[in-house]
Amino acid sequence: MIFLLAHLLDSFNSRLNMKKNPPVHQIELLIVKLSELSNSMDPTPFHHRNLDADAEEFLENWALEFPQNSHFRIIVHIEQMRWH
């Protein structure tokens, strides 16, 4: 389950400034394990796996709320990281 910290940084730039420097919108996700973001049915190695369908839909819907010329920053916080 993805817990949303929802740090949305909305730049309130003028229309002219938005054309030069598109606003950057940021979202932070807090997950327990990195595997929560990937499709568990995907047999490929982790770094090539598809994003979990629910996570993908959530991020797409969030991004679609902003103007097309926007830039996005996604920060993922992982509570349990396994080190080899």
Image (tube, helix red, strand yellow):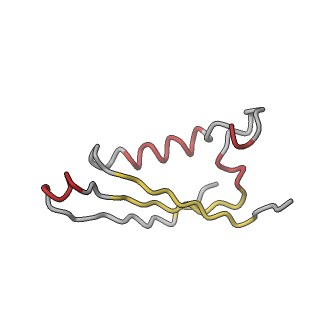
| Rendered location of residue 63, percent (x, y) | 39, 48
Compared to residue 50, the image places residue 27 above or below, namely below
What residue is drawn where x is 56% and y is 46%? 55
| Rendered location of residue 34, percent (x, y) | 70, 54
Q: Which quarter of the image is occupied by the C terminus?
A: bottom right
Q: Quadrant of residue 80?
A: bottom right
Q: Is residue 55 left or right of residue 6?
A: right
What residue is drawn where x is 76% and y is 63%? 81
Q: In the image shown, does 1 or 35 lie closer to the viewer?
A: 35
Q: Quadrant of residue 40?
A: top right
Disc count in the image? 0
Q: Is residue 35 left or right of residue 51?
A: right
Q: Is residue 84 left or right of residue 25?
A: right
What residue is drawn where x is 67% and y is 43%? 38
Q: Which quarter of the image is occupied by the N terminus?
A: bottom right
Q: In the image shown, does 35 or 1 lie closer to the viewer?
A: 35
| Rendered location of residue 52, percent (x, y) | 62, 41
